[in-house]
Amino acid sequence: MKHALVVYNSLNGKKEPFQSLLADHVGMYVCGPTVYSNVHLGNCRTFISFDLIFRYLQHLGYKVRYVRNITDAGHLENDADEGEDRIAKKARLESIEPMEVVQRYTVDFRNTMAQFNALPPSIEPTATGHIVEQIELIKQILEEGYAYETNGSVYFDVIRFNEDIPYGKLSGRNIEDLVHNSRALDGQSDKRNPQDFALWKKAEPEHIMRWPSPWSDGFPGWHLECTAMSTKYLGTQFDIHGGGMDLKFPHHECEIAQAESVYKKAPVKYWIHANMLTLNGKKMAKSTGNNILPNEMFSGQNTIFKKSFSPMVARFFMLQAHYRSIVDLSENALEASEKGFHRLVEGIEKLEQLPLCENSTGLDLKQWTQSCYAAMDDDFNSPVLIAHLFDAVKYINSVSNGIQQINSKDLNTLSHTMKSFFFDVLGLLTPEKGDRNGESSQLEGTLELLMELRNKARANKDFKTSDLIRDSLERMKIQINDTAEGTSFKIN
Ligand code: AMP
Ligand code: ZN
């Protein structure tokens, strides 16, 4: 079933009907993490946004080849021309091999994404595994005349490229402004112009991560790896390229220039950028320390929140915002999401127990199903989809209370649509019973303790205490039932 899917293309700032380049196949490339430290929740938000997109395209019947790279080599702090490789720096500080750093944080990244129930990509190529392809690409750019070599390093010549093919299409920056705003070179630099960027850097003697090349023992520039790997696995033109908003410039702009300099055509049809997760109103980032790691949130071991939040609550929280909106992480917002998530889970669980009637009343299920698709077809609008799922929960509750009715055919439609959006598209999982969240299991434990104390009081004929416990709980709408088998409680 094909839908009128519309996606927002950062290339022109417009929503466009989605049409894949090759029938039912979609090629999607997303810039992956740099594995020199644990991913923080901000990084996770971007990857969860693309997991939603991956899942929905598959749900619509597309065969998606989803390539997400691992940056495991060679880019310097702030993409600078000088300085230390971040992976090598970490290795030096911890007295381990750079590849041990890479392994540790790649494993952490995969585990974290699995906790969020994100699907693994179809291909997860590494930069160090594609040095040969990167060297070949540099040779081609040099042959085309858009790069130059100085002292063993190779740079992309932005001004020369712009003479033939316009530079700045994605970010909207024009070359005059770039030239005007760039800091002047200090005379030490090998670059001809400040806006040029490295394709290959000659390694200083102390630089550990290095490979032989026709120009020097060195390492590739960061922008190059994504062009080399996306072309290798998706071709010289593919459907979707994604990443966080902060990668638009210079990273993605440089990718376009590299690809166009060789293949003379736009490499990507739809550029999709996910917006940032902020903490205390500021972008969550590794470098500033303004961040929280997923495990710190799941375990509650952090100084930011008073309680823990499960991976599914965090995922639901993120999906309650559109992927192009900025989201600020706060305890209040997370608590509201936790409540909402459990309301949704309870609604799904109630589906199995709804009483069936001859006729349905209350909700036009055909129209409701269409609205769910319409939300996702409108540039993957998960918050609107979730609002429709809550409408269904309201309906499920009123059927359950006998206010509305449902017949078996409609129940099938409702159940199928609810579950496919909840599990397959939003990628949510229902929590195990007793693991609803920290708060519910704490409440259950507390009630069990109160039951035990009440039983003891009754055994001692201390009815004043046992009645006090029962009456107080009943005022809190917690009902106690004494039967021959024992005492049970029910939260109303
Ligand atoms: P990095 O490892 O820093 O290259 O980041 C990996 C991905 O996370 C990139 O797509 C970034 O755009 C994205 N990212 C970084 N910080 C945030 C944030 N605060 N919110 C959302 N995405 C982010
Ligand atoms: Zn990239």
Image (cartoon, grey):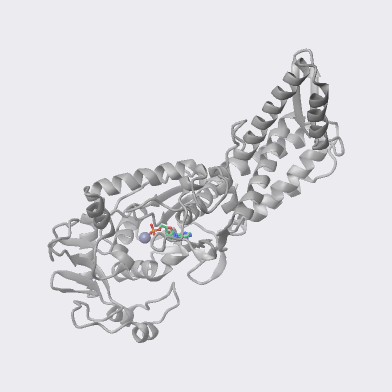
Front residue of this view, candidates 217 and 264 = 217
Residue at (35, 48) in percent of width and height: 124
The residue positioned farthest toward the right in the image shown: 403
The relative height of residue 180 versus residue 197 in the rendered view (above or below) is below
Q: Position of residue 464 (x, y in %)?
A: 83, 25
The residue positioned farthest toward the top in the image shown: 484
Residue at (62, 44) in percent of width and height: 421
Quarter of the rendered structure image containing ligand 2? bottom left
76 left or right of 252 in image: left
Which quarter of the figure is the C terminus placed in?
A: top right
Q: Position of residue 308 (x, y in %)?
A: 55, 44
The relative height of residue 438 versus residue 24 in the rendered view (above or below) is above
Place residue 266 in its image quadrant.
bottom left
Q: Would you say residue 385 is visible in this rendering?
A: yes
Front residue of this view, candidates 257 and 23 = 257
Q: Would you say residue 3 is visible in this rendering?
A: no
